[in-house]
Amino acid sequence: MESTESSYVSSPEAPRKRSPPPPKSLTSDYVEKPTYIRFLVSNAAAGSVIGKGGATISDFQSQSGARIQLSRNYEFFPGTSDRIIMISGALDDVIKAVELILAKLLSELHAEDGVNIDPRTKVRIIVPNSSCGSIIGKGGAIIKSFIEESQAGIKISPQDNNFYGLNDRLVTLTGTLEEQIRAIDLILSKLFEDPHYSQTMNAPFSYAVAYNSVNYGANGAAGKFQNNKEDRTNSVTIGVADEHIGLVVGRGGRNITEISQVSGARIKISDRGDFMSGTNDRKITITGSQRAIRAAEGMIMQKVAYASERGAD
C-alpha cells in the first residue's frame, strides 16, 4: 500500500457517465456550477480511500461523477498528522462522493471495532476563514439552524495564527453518517452561494508552503520570514517506544531522512539503552523552527501509529 500511496497525488479527471441528478432549485446553475469540499483523513484512511492501484477512488469517481484528489503522503494539514481530500464537481456529485468515502471509512471502523463502535463519529472540513461568516450567520443564527436541522454537532475552530499564510479553519461535524451528510449538505449549499468560497477552489491544498516557509514566501518574499519567531531555532525531545524506533528510522535510515527533508528539521535519536527518564522510550531530539518541529513530530507520530496498528493486527 505504501508504494501506491506515496506516488498517488491526484486522480484523473472523473468520467461523467451518469446524468446529473434533478436540481434542488429551479436554476440549472445549481447543478452545473462546480464547487468543492476539503476534509481531513488519517494516512491509513487515505490508503483505504485510494484502494489497491487506485481502484477504490476510481470507482467512487465513476459512481459520483465528482473528482477526488488527495494531498501527498506526509503533506498534512498544519498542526495535524492528517492528509487532505478534495472533492470537486457539481454540488450533488460532491455530496455523493463525500457520502461514499465516509460510508467506506465507517464500515472499516465497524469491521475493526465490532459492536463497540460509537455510531457518532467526527469529520473535519476545511473552510476558508473568509467564508466562515456565511455559515455562522448573524449572532450564530445560521450555524444554530444547521445544528437543529441536521442534529449533528458543528464546531468551528478559531483561526490558527501559528502558521504563516494559513487562512483556513476546521469545521468539526460530530454525529452519525446520516447527520454528518445532512450537515455537509447544508454547509456546502450555503458556501456554494458565497463568492469568496468559489474563488478559493483552485488554490493549492497541500499546505507544503506552510511547512517549508523560508523557501516559499508569498510572491517570493522569503525575507518576510527572517524575523518571524516561528523560524527561530528550537529543540524538542519526544519519547518513542524502543520497539517502534526501527519503523521510524526505516531501512538504511530512509524514513528518518525523508522526515527530515520534508519538515526541514534536524532529527537525532538516542543510542540503544539511552531512554527517557523512568521509561523504555528512546529519545528523539528534533531541532529547527517551531513549524519544522511540528511537521517532523507529526510525521514521526504517524509512523508510530502505523507501527501500533500493525502490532495490534
Image (spheres, rainbow, N blue to C red):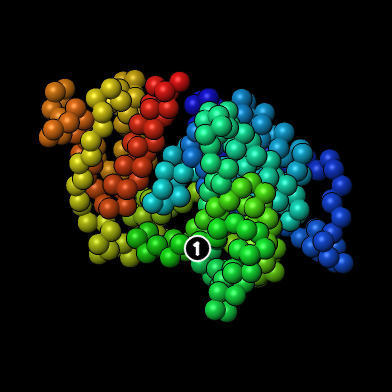
Q: Secondary structure at mark 1?
A: strand
Could you tell me which residue is drawn at 43 percent across and 65 percent down?
158
Q: In x, y percent, where is residue 184?
A: 64, 56
The image shows residue 201, relative to residue 85, as above or below, that is below
The image shows residue 19, relative to residue 269, as above or below, that is below
Q: In x, y percent, where is residue 105?
A: 59, 37
Q: In x, y percent, where is residue 248?
A: 32, 28
Could you tell me which residue is drawn at 62 percent across and 52 percent down?
180
- Total tally of numbered discs in the picture: 1
Q: In x, y percent, where is residue 277?
A: 12, 34
Mark 1 surroundings within 10 Å by alpha-carbon count, few (fewer than 14), some (14 through 19), many (20 or more): some
Left or right of 283 in this view: 253: right
What amino acid is found at the position of numbered circle 1 in the picture? Ile
In this view of the protein, can residue 189 be seen by the observer?
yes
Question: Which image quadrant is residue 190 in?
Answer: bottom right
Label 1 belongs to which residue? 156
The image shows residue 264, relative to residue 3, as above or below, that is below
Question: Which image quadrant is residue 216 in?
Answer: bottom left
Could you tell me which residue is drawn at 23 percent across and 39 percent down?
238
